[in-house]
Amino acid sequence: MKAHNSLLHLPKSNSSMAGGSENATASLITNTVENESKEKNVYNFESISAHSSQRSSNKQILLSTAVVIMRNARGESTACRVLLDSGSQSNFISKSMSQTLRLNKTRVSCTIIGINESAHNASYMASANIESRVSSYKVNIDFYILPRLTGNIPLSKIDVSKFQIPAEFKLADPTYSEPQKIDAILGSEVFYDLLCANQFKLPQSNLIMQETQLGWIVAGSTQAREDISRTSTVALCTSLSKLEEQVSKFWRTEEIGSKTAFTLEEKVCREHFENTVQRDEQGRFVVQLPFRDNAKKLGDSKPTATRRFHGLEKRLLTSPRLKIEYSKFMKEYEDLEHMTRVKMCSNAKENYYLPHHAVWREDSVTTKLRVVFDASCKTTSGVSLNDVLLKGPCIQEDLINLLTRFRKHRYAMTADISKMYRRIWVAPNHRTYQQIVWRPAPDQELHQFQLNTITYGTVPASFLATACLHRLADEESNLYPDACNAIKQDFYMDDYLGGAESLQGAITLRDDIIEVLKKGGFDLRKWTASDPELLTGLANKENDSTLILDLSENSAKILGLRWDPSDDVFKYKVKLSERKTIVTKRQILSEIATIFDPLGLISPVVIKAKIKMQHLWAMGIGWDEALPEETMLDWYKFRESLLLLNNLFIPRCIVITGEIIDVQIHGFSDASIEAFGACLYLITTNNQGERSSRLICAKSRVAPLKSISLPRLELCGARTAVLAKRPVGTFS
């Protein structure tokens, strides 16, 4: 048998494998990440399993093929022969077909790893519409572009004269029995959506005919010609999209941010917000979606959203707990009037249907399940909602600035805004662009709903929510100047990290922030504080069990850091996975990336990990290639030492007790041939003559692989010290 994907072949062998037809299967693992802007071209990680069957010595396996109409965003079309592959979790198109249709390509960096760890790269993705020749079915699909998908299928011409195919059957591929090239592979994303109920077994053969939206397909085993070489393929491949982007993100956690001027689009988005934002009778904000272009560029999105919902529904049926939580989430959404049931809009270009799926976070204290809406899903025109929306500028405080300021308060407290996005209404005339399909059970009718609030998954959601907070602070600044200043400076999205120099000052600040936010319809919950007195007196009219955070583990996660309020210290929690006999570069990066250290408080540890990673890079070792034994043993030793971080406690507060009469900031920098870095210390003296020295932050970088003189590296370290000083200028 000729395999359907030549990238994934086992080498041909003259000896056949024992037994008849077998299947190779692989489990699906999907890690969903928050959608990002199109400009960055960031895509989800996904594993792709592809499989075919092997034949015995006198059989050939006929794979399911179909001829469809493929159409680009300009409406130009051509006939395309596709392979239907339920074992593939992604879709592929040949380079020649993408060039024929002149598809708009998006640059990606995707490594496809096949059997025996053979690797092939896909550098581009493209979107195209697939239309049936025999029905009204059509769908927009994203494809990875590959130079070559497979050889001709079937391998040899099959004698169909003995097959008694009913004349009324419209074949998906009229020439299924003749060897021809494959232009595209349609994976499980659409495979099961194509299937219809009818199935027919051809008399006196092992071939099965299955009715689909594309016509009747033919598959199964048939007699092979004696002169055809015997082949056997069993394949599993995994693609990791934009792996290099993930690596660069890891390096960027040590970068020192600097504010840049807004781009023209960011200015337009901010002006749009300022000119259109309103508040209703209850004080809640009403915003309009900032469209980049005319929304009429959107095509039909409902078929894709419906198809993906059916896939979600099948997943929910296999996980009773997930189904219960998902249904509960959606019911709450409707009960709070954050979504309402609507009739189907007749004009497809005046609405947009959002596919949705579940993200489960077992470590979350309050919300283990979050429903994420996909506004980046392409419509039939090849354009998504996020494509026509402006993202908006980042107007919230830099993470390092916020954490540094949090450490200077003698009395510290944290909280977060409950359902922040859903406290802000979207203008009624724009809600048609936030529609979904949903039903609690498969035996119920599928209904359409529109989302009435800012939606998680749309490009401008973060900006719109933060801008509403800032607008609220500006409007209430005359009555509550300190609280409004804290709202603008001490919030990172919905997380508040703040405090004051005195207990009474902190209580007053807490109450004022609560009062101001209530005027905008925002509620704070999950309170923690360095002094229990700050948690007393919190009104709990609705008996919210999450008003005060339950610290069963004696620590709260604040922006990725662990803070123990009772001892007022930062902690680190390192959990090592089971030790593996084979270690790869991918595994090392995965474990290094779990160390989150935005302030650089454990820079000496992190920089050693980065140096080891750089050495692996310089050695030219592949992502899934086993490391040399000496390198592996060195990593094991370092890995075990990471457990010592569990015994490390770093005081949160960096100022001395009593009345401070002198404040100094001391910076140090140094460099070696492997790395350079800098650190800042805060020296405070009180009126009793007592002095305290505390580490504020530290930054480190590995030296470039290109040879650079030590004096130049020391200059780089000095520059790092100057940059690190920026977020701590408010101490003086």
Image: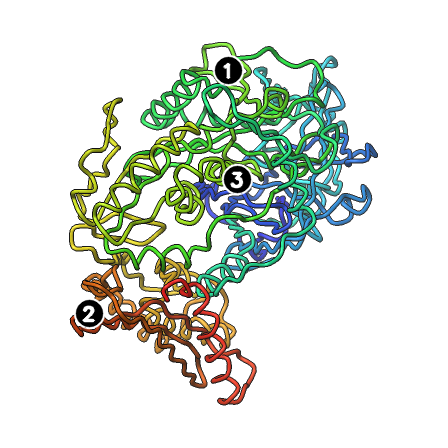
Contact? badges 2 and 3 (CB < 8 Å): no
Q: Quadrant of residue 639?
A: bottom left
Disc assigned to residue 631: none
Residue type highlighted by circle 2: Asn
Mark 1 or mark 2: name the one nearer the start of the chain. Answer: 1
User: In the image, what residue occupies the spot 46% across and 46% down?
Assistant: 18
Disc assigned to residue 687: 2
Q: Is residue 226 above or below residue 420?
A: below
Percent coordinates x, y for residue 20 in the rendering: 49, 39
Tag 3, which secondary structure? helix
What's the distance in space between the residues labelled 2 and 3, CA to CA?
Answer: 42 Å
Residue type highlighted by circle 3: Ala
Quarter containing the N terminus: top right
Q: Quadrant of residue 575?
A: bottom left
Q: Is residue 335 above or below residue 260?
A: above
Percent coordinates x, y for residue 449 in the rendering: 53, 17
Q: Is residue 36 above or below residue 63?
A: below
Residue closest to the eye, 572 or 454: 454
**Image depth: mark 1 or mark 2 in front:** 2
What's the distance in space between the residues labelled 1 and 3, CA to CA?
Answer: 25 Å
Percent coordinates x, y for residue 399 in the rendering: 42, 55
Contact? badges 1 and 2 (CB < 8 Å): no
Q: Please state if 570 lies on the left or on the right of 3 as rendered.
A: left
Tag 1, which secondary structure? strand
Q: Which residue is mark 1?
A: 340
Label 1: few (<14), some (14–19) or many (≥20) C-alpha neighbours in 10 Å: some
User: In the image, what residue occupies the spot 46% across and 75% down?
Assistant: 702
Disc assigned to residue 467: 3
User: In the image, what residue occupies the spot 42% across and 85% down?
Assistant: 672
